[in-house]
Each structure stands twice: as C-alpha cells, then as structure tokens.
Image: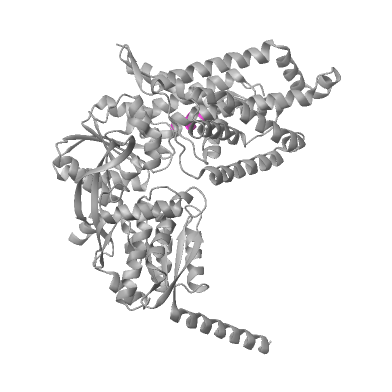
C-alpha cells in the first residue's frame, strides 16, 4: 500500500513538474464557447475571430507560444461551463480563460477565475455585472446598456418626443428597456407605453397591432437574435407600420445579416445602435472583412467575430506589457487602461471597471448596390457601461 | 368602420390555421393509429427546409415549393414508418415516445449540420407581404391565404375520411384491425398512407410557417408543445376537434397578447387547463 502511495505521489509530482516546465515556453488559453447546439453559429464566429487574429499576428507573443484549448459548453449550462473552466485550469493548466458567449456561463466561469486567479477575457456576453464577479475578468465585446442607453439619448436628441418600448420578457430585455428609458428620459423624451413580450414568442402581430393603435413617434424593440427579428420585422410590415414614418429603433441583433435577408425590404429605415458592423468604412475594418471572408468561406464577420478578434488583441497586448508573464495580478494590471485600434474603431479597457470602452454607431438600414446593409450615419465615442458609471457615482 | 376586436379575431384564426396544419397530422396518427409520434414536428421542419432549399438554391417560386414540401415530408415519413415505426405499433407508449423523441433529436442535429443554426431566409412574393384595408380593419394578405389553406384542408380531410371508400377503410382498420384485414382490407397499406398524409400535412404546415414564425433546427421541438396542446384540447383523432382547438388556441394567444400582454403567452396554457378540466378527453374526444 505504501509503495502504491509513493508511486502515486511521484507520478503526481512528475506531472506537476511537466506542467510547469511546459508552461515556461507556452501560454495556454482555454476557450469556452457553446460550439454545439443552439448557439453554435455564434460560437463559430467568435472562434473565427480568434483564429483570424492568430493567423495574422502569429502564435508567439513576447517570446511565448500561444496555445488554444477549446471546450464546448453546449448552450446555456452554467454547471458545465464551471466544470470545463475547472478542468482547463487543473488538468490542462491553462493560464488564461477566454471565449464566453453566454451570460449565465460567464458568471459561472468568473467564480473559477476568481478562485484560481486566472485572467478571464469575455469575448461576447453582454450583461453589465459579469466583470464584477471576478477581479481578473475583463471584456472586449460590449454591454447591452451601453447600446440601449446611447440609443435612447440619441433618439431624444434627434427630435423624437414620444416612444413606445417592446422588449422580450427576460433579464436582458429588462436591462435593454431600462437602459433605453433612462437615456430617453434623461434627454427629455416621454415613454407612452411599454410592453414585455413572452420570450418564447413565435407571432408578434398582436403586440405590434397594440403598438400601432397607440401611434407613437418611435418604437424601441429588443428581442433575442435568431428566429425573432425576422418575425418581428415581418409583423411590422404586415401591420402597415412604415419605418419611414414611425421610427423603429433597436439593437444590432434586429438587423444583423441573416435577419435582414429574412425581412427583405420591410427592414428599410430601421435604426439601430451597435458597436460593430462589417459595413464600417475604416481601412482596418475593410481589410478585416476581406481577410475574414477569404479565410472562412465568404460570410461577413459580425460582432461575435469582432469580440473574438479584439479579445485576442487584448491578450496579446497584455502579454507584451508583462513580457510574457501570465500571472493573473500582473496581467490584469497590464490590461487595465490598454488602448488599441480595432476594426470597430478605437477601443480601451476602463482601468477602474475592467470593462470595455468603445464607439457606438447609430445605423440605418439602407439598400446599397441591391443589398440591405446597416449604414452608420452617426456615432457616439468613448461609451462606457452606464450601469458601472452609475455605481461609481453612488 | 369595424371594431378592432374583429381584427384580433381574424389574426387569431389565421394563426390557428397555421397551428391546425401543423397538428392535424398528429391528431390523425395519435388518434386513429394509436401511435405517439413526437417526431411529428420533425416532418414539419423537413417540409420547411425543402421549401427554403428549393427557393434559395433552385430559385423556385414559393407556391411551387409547397406541393414538394408536402410530398417529400410524406415520402420521408413512409420510409420511417416502413423501417422503424411499424415495429412499435404494438409496443408500449413509452417505447414509442423514446423512439420518436430520439428521432426528433436526431433531426435537430441533422438540420443544424446541413443548414447551420441560423434562421432560414425566404423571400415571399410582394403581393403576399403587406396588408390591405377592409372597412378600417387591417387584413394581412398572407394570413388571409393561411385561412384559405386551412379551411380547404379541413374540408378535404373530413370529406376524405367520412365520405370515401378509403376513409371507410381507415376507420374500419382503426376500430378493429383483425376484422378489417379479414374483410380483405390491406391494413398495413392503409396505415402507411394515413401516416404519410398526416406527415405531408405537417410538411406543408412547416413550409407555410416560415413566413410567420421562421425556421431553424429547433423547430422540431418549439412547435411540439403547441401541437400537443391542440391535439389534446381538440380530442384525439378528431379533425373537427383539431380545427376548433387550433382556432381557440390561436384566438386566445393573439387576444391575450393584445388585451393583456402581462399574461403574455401564458393564456393558452390556462385555456388548455380549463378545457381539459371541463372535458378531459378534449372538445371532440370520444375517449
């Protein structure tokens, strides 16, 4: 028995040594994304952003080789995400956790990040409070209130006085509604009515008819991406709500590429706020889009891809500053305040909140060369997460 | 000017027709053949993907794809019926549920593999989009079309089952299989055709549903709940029952969202509970 124990201990020690020896020349990044299931396409796009960055900038930074280990969390499953994060750290000995598409999974991951002291880079999940859950957590996507509050104040400043809100009845929907109302009221607008729609809701016609009967100047909508934007757009067209007369305001999900294909011309004139679109006219983005299309078979990159790409940018920039040291305290300190230029425009990590600071674009759906695109016609620079800003004031 | 309540009624009936097309096939297989087919909506999804593929790859017009959505869903269901389902006709409900829910899961994965998890786009002809005004009521063109299809299918089905020789054979086979085959009715074939008909209608429903609710690989499960509600509220095996239940659920869903949005989509469950407490076998159920 003793001999077995001894042998076991020796093996364990050998394993530990092997682990640390390997770590000297390599930095491992554990990417947790829902590669299978309902969110597989979104995960693929984040992943392609990561791949594209590494193809362009190589797989070594500050003398260290970067190795990516991918884990599939398969949909909304916090316990699975937590277990994967633990396995990545304990078994695969990763130095950094990255990916994180879904809020519940990210919050579970943050617990592991805080306990194991590993930097965690959120490449998509957009609920404000996530980054507060671990002192080593940072984000390169956006937060929902950043988008909706910006849209609300923009609307109030641009001659819209009375608005109606329609949101899906779940936590992000409530955040979006509150964000828009805060921004809109602060700018002097008036909310003439609000409705929260069932999340599993295949047919919007009744909600839209209700909004139409109230006859507001603008309707703010927030619904999860995927099946619903097209159904909602069609309901607007079917009820005879013309986006040219009643302004339809929303977040970028409402008019992403697949939704636009579905909606057809009924989408013309919808106004959305969003941090990224493949149509942005800066040189870096045009190169990014061209490289992305060439690499991954013709589809345009979207905000998921941008989140993944910028997540890798932040990791590389951070490691450059620490000269390849992935120790969580040093790396997160280096990441704070990091500024870089992204296909989205100028980006920064807020040194106080570790959350992202970026430009929010106001876009309108227009027909360019026979195709429906989100044309940005206005922007708000250096947008910080309003929830964190409000928390600071208290 | 007509009061808005009529608009709500119309929308509800149109939505109900969509649910009717999706569920009537299940009502037939469940009620007449006693087979619990939880993969029913997978055939509906197949019909949807047939339409999407024909429209986007081969550029067929929408209406031309509908017969094929029906036929391919029907043909696929016959293949399943001949190879898998028929083995379980005499098995317990649980075995049937396990097999068919498994097929539904497989169909979701297969659809995601071939088409991705995103929403499938369809480009409706312009005259099917938008709406026209009748005495102040907003009538959506596509919904009017749905009502037309729903009524036509109902009339055709009731006619076929009640007044044709084939319908009589189906009813005979259901009531007493041994006696029916003793009289020279080919029970196997009758069931295969009935099953194909039900799945074909689901395929048609799936194709018609894209414009209203969209299509993605989760369709096989998203609509299963609605379909089961309608079958149970309407009563097993009753076409008129499915029709009435679909209208009832469609109208209460739309009216609920319009007048009491706080209740949201919960109202249809409430309606189901009330109906089943009043008539446990469903509106037109016999047992």
Q: Residue B177: where, in percent of width, then height? A: 80, 24
Judged left or right of residue B16, residue B159 is: right
| Residue nearest the observer in this picture, B128 or A212 | B128
User: What coloring was used for the rendering?
Assistant: one colour
Q: Position of residue A109 (x, y in %)?
A: 43, 63
Tell which of A103 and A379 is nearer to you: A379
Answer with the quarter of the image where residue A232 lies. top left
The magenta stretch is: B267-272
- Name the dominant secondary structure of the magenta segment: helix
Q: Between A75 and A374, which is closer to the camera in this rendering?
A: A374
Q: Residue at x 40, y 68 (%)?
A: A58
**Location of residue A311 with respect to B126 vertically, above or below:** below
User: Per the image, is A148 magenta?
Assistant: no
Give the total number of marks visible in the rendering.
0
Q: Is residue A198 visible?
A: no
- Residue B187 visible in the shown view: yes
Is A302 positioned to the left or the right of A85 in the image?
Answer: left
Tell me: B251 left or right of B28.
left
Residue farthest right in this picture:
B182
Q: Quadrant of residue A161?
A: top left
Q: Quadrant of the N terminus of chain B?
A: top left
Quarter containing the C terminus of chain B: top right
Which percent across, then down, holds residue A40?
48, 51
Considering depth in this image, is A280 or B101 the residue closer to the camera?
A280
Q: Is residue B192 above or below residue B121?
A: above
Residue A266, percent from left and from top = 33, 30
């Amino acid at each position: 028995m003793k001999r077995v124990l001894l042998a076991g201990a020796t093996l364990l020690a050998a394993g530990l040594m092997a682990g640390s020896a390997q770590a000297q020349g390599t930095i491992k990044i554990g990417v947790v994304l829902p590669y299978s299931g309902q969110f597989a396409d979104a995960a693929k796009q984040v992943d392609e952003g990561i791949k594209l960055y590494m193809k362009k900038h190589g797989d070594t930074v500050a003398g260290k080789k970067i190795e990516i280990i991918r884990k599939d969390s398969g949909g909304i499953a916090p316990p699975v995400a937590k277990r994967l994060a633990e396995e990545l750290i304990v078994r695969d000995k990763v130095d950094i956790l990255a990916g994180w598409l879904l809020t519940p999974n990210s919050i579970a991951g943050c617990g592991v990040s805080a306990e194991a002291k590993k930097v965690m880079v959120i490449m998509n999940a957009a609920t404000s409070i996530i980054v507060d859950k671990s002192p080593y957590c940072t984000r390169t996507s956006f937060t929902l209130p950043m988008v909706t509050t910006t849209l609300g104040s923009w609307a109030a400043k641009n001659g819209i006085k009375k608005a109606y809100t329609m949101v899906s009845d779940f936590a992000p929907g409530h955040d979006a509604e509150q964000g828009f109302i805060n921004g809109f009221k602060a700018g002097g607008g008036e909310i003439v009515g609000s409705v929260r729609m069932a999340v599993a809701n295949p047919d919007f016609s009744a909600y839209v008819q209700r909004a139409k009967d109230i006859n507001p100047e603008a309707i703010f909508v927030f619904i999860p991406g995927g099946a619903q934007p097209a159904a909602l757009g069609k309901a607007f067209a079917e009820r005879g709500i013309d986006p040219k007369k009643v302004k339809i305001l929303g977040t970028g999900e409402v008019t992403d590429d697949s939704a636009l294909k579905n909606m057809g011309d009924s989408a013309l004139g919808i106004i959305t706020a969003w941090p990224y679109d493949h149509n942005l006219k800066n040189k870096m983005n045009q190169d990014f889009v061209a490289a992305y299309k060439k690499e991954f078979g013709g589809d345009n990159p979207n905000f998921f891809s941008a989140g993944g790409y910028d997540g890798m940018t932040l990791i590389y920039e951070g490691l450059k500053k620490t000269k390849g040291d992935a120790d969580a305290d040093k790396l997160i300190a280096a990441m704070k305040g990091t500024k870089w230029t992204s296909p989205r425009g100028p980006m920064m990590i807020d040194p106080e909140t570790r959350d992202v600071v970026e430009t929010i674009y106001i876009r309108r759906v227009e027909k360019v060369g026979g195709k429906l695109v989100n044309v940005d016609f206005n922007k708000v620079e250096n947008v910080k997460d309003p929830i964190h800003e409000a928390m600071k004031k208290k | 000017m007509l009061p808005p309540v009529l608009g709500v009624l119309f929308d509800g009936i149109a939505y109900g027709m969509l649910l009717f097309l999706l569920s009537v096939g299940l009502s037939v297989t469940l009620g007449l053949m006693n087979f619990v087919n939880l993969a029913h909506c997978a055939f509906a999804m197949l019909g949807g993907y047939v339409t999407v593929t024909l429209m986007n790859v081969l550029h067929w017009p929408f209406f031309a794809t509908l017969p094929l959505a029906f036929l391919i869903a029907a043909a696929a269901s016959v293949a399943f019926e001949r190879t898998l389902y028929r083995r379980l006709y005499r098995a317990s409900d649980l075995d049937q549920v396990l097999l068919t829910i498994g097929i539904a899961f497989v169909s979701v994965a297969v659809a995601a593999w071939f088409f991705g998890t995103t929403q499938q786009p369809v480009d409706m002809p312009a005259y099917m989009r938008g709406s026209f005004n009748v005495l102040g009521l907003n009538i959506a063109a596509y919904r009017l079309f749905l009502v037309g299809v729903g009524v036509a299918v109902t009339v055709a089905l009731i006619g076929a089952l009640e007044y044709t020789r084939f319908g009589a054979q189906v009813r005979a086979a259901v009531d007493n299989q041994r006696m029916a085959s003793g009289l020279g009715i080919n029970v196997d074939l009758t069931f295969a055709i009935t099953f194909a008909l039900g799945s074909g209608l689901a395929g048609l429903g799936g194709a018609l549903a894209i414009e209203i609710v969209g299509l993605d690989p989760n369709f096989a499960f998203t609509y299963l709940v609605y379909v089961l509600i309608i079958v149970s509220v309407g009563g097993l095996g009753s076409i008129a029952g499915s029709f009435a239940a679909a209208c009832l659920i469609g109208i209460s869903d739309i009216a609920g969202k319009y007048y009491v949005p706080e209740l949201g989509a919960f109202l249809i469950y409430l309606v189901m509970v009330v109906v089943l407490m009043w008539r446990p076998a469903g509106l037109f159920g016999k047992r």
